[in-house]
Amino acid sequence: MTDPRLAQVAWVARIALALVFIWHGLVPKILWLSPDELAMIQAHGLSAPEWVARLAGALEIILGVLLLIRGRRWPIVLAAALLIGLLLDVLLMSPHLLLQAFNPLSTNLAALALCWVVWRLESAPKSLHH
């Protein structure tokens, strides 16, 4: 990508996507364990839901940091796959959450749009003038 404006847009989209994962890993899973997070984990019958939430939070933070590494496209694919998988999980296991303000549907669709923006901009053909 040779247009510096498009490179800026891709970078801002990467940062925004990374912040989504870092925030959702840190705040509702590690710092202030959300009752909704616990309920989603408990819906799967997993033991030690607090531990599972904190582990998931740590992994989300790691993914958020990996998303900040320019030139690495696999974290974008991983983020998109997780966003789709987690949204399907909510649809099947906790559909009542889709009625809440700023619910998983709106959050995940916005984050998926950021994945698409980064993927498309970083896939743009290179200029032949280089």
Image (tube, helix red, strand yellow):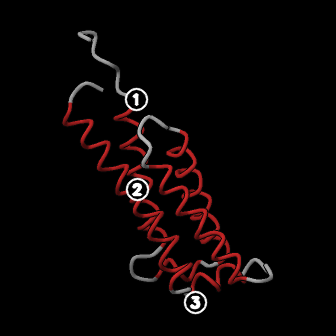
What residue appears at the point 41 percent right and 44 percent down from the top-left corner? 116
User: Of residues 13 and 95, which is closer to you in this image?
Assistant: 13
- Residue 30 in percent (x, y) is at 56, 79
Q: Secondary structure at mark 2?
A: helix
Q: CA distance from mark 2 to mark 1?
A: 17 Å
Residue at the outermost bottom position: 35
Q: Secondary structure at mark 3?
A: helix
What residue appears at the point 21 percent right and 28 percent down from the top-left corner? 3
Q: Which is nearer the N-term, disc 2 or disc 3?
A: 2
Q: Do residues under tags 2 and 3 come within 8 Å of each other at their CB atoms? A: no
User: Of residues 36 and 25, which is closer to you in this image?
Assistant: 25
What residue appears at the point 50 percent right and 49 percent down from the top-left corner? 66
Q: Is residue 87 left or right of residue 46?
A: left
Residue tagged 1: 123
Residue density around tag 2, few if under 14, some if 14–19, many if 20 or more, within 10 Å: many
Q: Secondary structure at mark 1?
A: loop
Residue density around tag 1, few if under 14, some if 14–19, many if 20 or more, within 10 Å: few
In the displayed structure, would residue 117 be above or below residue 123?
Answer: below
Residue tagged 2: 17
User: Of residues 69 and 82, which is closer to you in this image?
Assistant: 69
Q: Amino acid at mark 1?
A: Ser
In the displayed structure, would residue 11 be above or below residue 24?
Answer: above
- Residue 47 in percent (x, y) is at 80, 82
Q: Which is nearer the N-term, disc 3 or disc 1?
A: 3
